[in-house]
Image: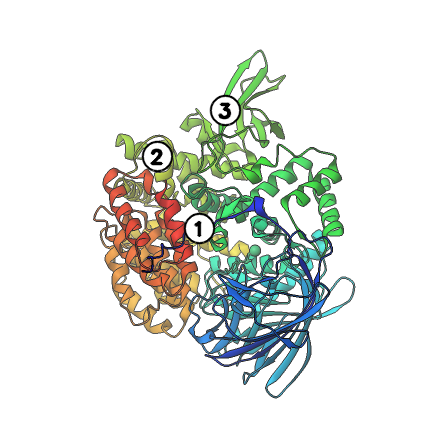
Amino acid sequence: MKDASPATAPETIYLKDYTPFGYDIESVHLTFHLAPEATRVLSKIRFAPKADATDATFFLHGEELKLISAKIDGQEVSPTLVEGGLKCDVPSAPFTWEAEVEINPAGNTALEGLYMSNGMYCTQCEAEGFRKITYYPDRPDVMSTFTVRIEGDASVMLSNGNPMGKGEGWAEWHDPWPKPAYLFALVAGDLVNHPGQFTTKSGKEVELNIWVRPGDEDKCAFGMEALKKSMKWDEDVYGLEYDLELFNIVAVDDFNMGAMENKGLNIFNSSCVLASPETSTDANFERIEAIIAHEYFHNWTGNRITCRDWFQLCLKEGLTVFRDAQFTADMRSEPVKRIEDVIALRARQFPEDNGPLAHPPRPEQFQEINNFYTATVYEKGAEVIGMLKRLVGDDNYYKALKLYFERHDGQACTIEDWLKVFEDATGRDLSQFKLWYSEAGTPRLKVSEDYADGTYTLTFEQSTPPTPGQPQKAPRVIPVAVGLLSPNGDEVRGTEVLELTEARQSFTFEGLAAKPVPSILREFSAPVILERETTNAERAFLLAHDTDPFNRWEAGNALAKEVRVAMVVDGATPDAAYLDALEKLVRDDDQDPAFRALVLSPPSQADIAQTLAERGHTPDPQKIYDAAETFAQTLAQQLETSLPRLYAATTVDGPYRPDAESAGKRALNGRILSLLTRLDGGEQAARQYATADNMTQQYTALSCLMKAEKADAQSQAFFDQWQHDRLVMDKWFALQIACASPENAAATAAALTRHPLFDMKNPNRFRAVFGALAGNHAGFHHASGDGYVLLADNLIALDKLNPQTTARMCAAFQTWKRYDTARQERIREQLLRIAGTDGLSRDTNEMVSRILDA
Ligand code: 0A1
Ligand code: ZN
């Protein structure tokens, strides 16, 4: 009798088990015969056994491949097919491996490997997608040059590197730079291009192209300018020049992430490259500029220097996010960018770092690497570099980076290599600093103060709560930027960076005539949670007087949170002093409109829930929602007489321009319109909707009307106007759910999943609906539990098609332990239902198990 075989437990991969591959690859030749359901891929790879190999096993990764034939040095061989690939006996001297496989791009809904999107062939190989194209050592430390021949009937056929030739039905490409397989790309389709040109600082001419579907060519100009600005900026700031004759960008509609930095052939989610004033908001323009820069910057930080293994992902991602943030700060406004980044960090990374999915920027184990493209690896990874730069100073930072590029160009590196460069360039010991890479969790920084006889003392106590697998935490190096203000508002000590290294540490400031007001953690100099007993009066004082714009915003933000917490916990009424401070600010034309818009933007309801949880309360989503509504209504009433005038004064007339200054003004105008809509029943918003000639103003007006439940006509008009445009339709889907009242959110989302334009296979559309549902805090967490059930139903359905996007969306449940037992029970039920689904993917299984383990 045959035993019932137990379900195989998913394998866990550990950093400590790293072993190099036993072979070098001298060259790779690939030939693709494209056909939607049966593409043939021929590979010809020159392998050389390494003299010092510790493991000579010849294992090639391969998944979902039909092996047609394999040869070594021209002789047919019969490799052994094993779980996840094949093994073969190979010669002990250099040899040529040839294989022919068949794959099915049209049936590939996971969007990893070679797949089809609207009739176009495209690839996504990071992290481990190349193994779905052919048998190969699919690991980032195996690097080679690639020569690619594509045969098919598409008018445009692209791959990495420089073009070698093309004719009727074929094209050939050669990439001279050795690269890992995850940077391989191929695109074939009937595409049109928006061309451009860039001359590098050493005088090399580079041809640029953005390739899109016919009809989208009028949405490429902004992306092209962003690309040229990025190329110039990387030369000016980091001295880094582009290294091929050609740089191609392709827009695809079906894509799991934002974009991908394949060498010389970046592939973009169309939402992250296509832009026009009529169809894109200011926020879209800013994001597109940043993502184009990010992918371009990867050419050096990621491609020329790559990662030894996937545990080192933050080596390329943290650094590249840090670089794109520097770029945006330079192109736009430094303080505004910093504030936006901190808002995003708190919204996405803090919940991760303080919940069941917490992991260090460099994790030490995973089951599915795709689950580690996280806010911790990306955004906290960038914060860590920001701290390093602050600790060593700007000059030393650029000196270390110069050394990094000199020493490691062409290599696959580790975090140790990265830190060693800083140690060698500066003479500094970074062993304690390294804890930021190896330990998870957001440090708490308790601050107390003392003043006597002209001497002011600040005492810091740091501690980091336990995280999964890491119960004990050691003190970290924390750079705390501090300035001191005198009671009359003058700055008596400019910004100084205090370097914390111990669990408890004091710093003194002498010669102060009066007890100062401290401005701590200026520019958010470290990703920590500051805990300090202070008063609303002092926060209002800092909001009015701090010279550090970040901390001025932070003071306002802290006040906004305190006021809402008091409303939720004690049933307080909105704080009058805070309302006055906001009124003063909104009228203060000397202040940057973008800054005023940020201070006027309420903290998110999820953020209030997190703050309540940190203070030991169980957040009630409905009460948080009610407090937000009451506060906004009270503020609107307080400003009642001046709102129409303020609205008129901040309206941006004239042709739309996406620059930061105009966008800042429109953001302020939008905040004012949302307050005004609470009083005028939507009159002004309807007028703005009717006359808007750009998406920012149209979208803002529509969202105000939807929130007021006065948008029936406009919502239909918007649909009629834009139903042909996929990206605008994503907005229409998302907005209805984001603006729905708590009791209607799940039903609105459910209805939209039945809309003819809902397409589960398109990640953008799925995220539009379910990202909006999860983002509607009170709606998703409505006591009925309907939001949880709807999301779980759809995750179960999506997992069969696209595990990667399903797994990422599971994070909506990660904060479940902060809510009351009834909600916890409802969420747990759904998590268990997902976990119990037959044939659940490894991706989703890992996420759900980690969340359940909380
Ligand atoms: N390296 C890309 C992000 C990316 C990661 C994985 C992908 O598919 C699984 C796709 C893109 C970046 O940082 O932009
Ligand atoms: Zn990246």
x and y, in percent, of residue 430 in the image: 66, 35
x and y, in percent, of residue 274 in the image: 50, 68
Q: Earlier in the sequence, mark 3 or mark 1?
A: 3
x and y, in percent, of residue 716 in the image: 29, 69
- The mark closer to the camera, 3 or 1, is 3
Alpha carbon separation for disc pair 1 and 2: 28 Å
Label tally: 3
Report the front residue among 654 and 824. Answer: 824
Q: Earlier in the sequence, mark 3 or mark 2?
A: 3
As drawn, is 4 to the left or to the right of 528? left
Q: Please, which residue is most extreme toward the bottom here?
A: 168
Q: Secondary structure at mark 1?
A: helix
Displayed quadrant of residue 400: top right
Q: Residues within 10 Å of mark 1 (few under 14, many from 20)?
A: many
Q: Please, which residue is most extreme toward the left here?
A: 784
Asked if the residue under mark 2 is in contact with the one under mark 1, i.e. CB atoms within 8 Å, the reply is no
Displayed quadrant of residue 37: bottom left
Q: Is residue 46 above or below residue 37?
A: above
Image quarter of the N terminus? bottom left
Q: Looking at the picture, which amino acid does disc 2 mark?
A: Leu
The residue to which callout 3 is attached is: 447
Q: Residues within 10 Å of mark 3 (few under 14, many from 20)?
A: some
Residue at the location (58% across, 41% down)? 384
Q: Is residue 404 above or below residue 440?
A: below
Q: Secondary structure at mark 3?
A: strand
The residue to which callout 2 is attached is: 612
Q: Looking at the picture, which amino acid does disc 3 mark?
A: Val
The residue to which callout 1 is attached is: 668
As drawn, is 631 to the left or to the right of 647? left
| Mark 1 sits near ligand 1, with its Cβ under 8 Å away | no
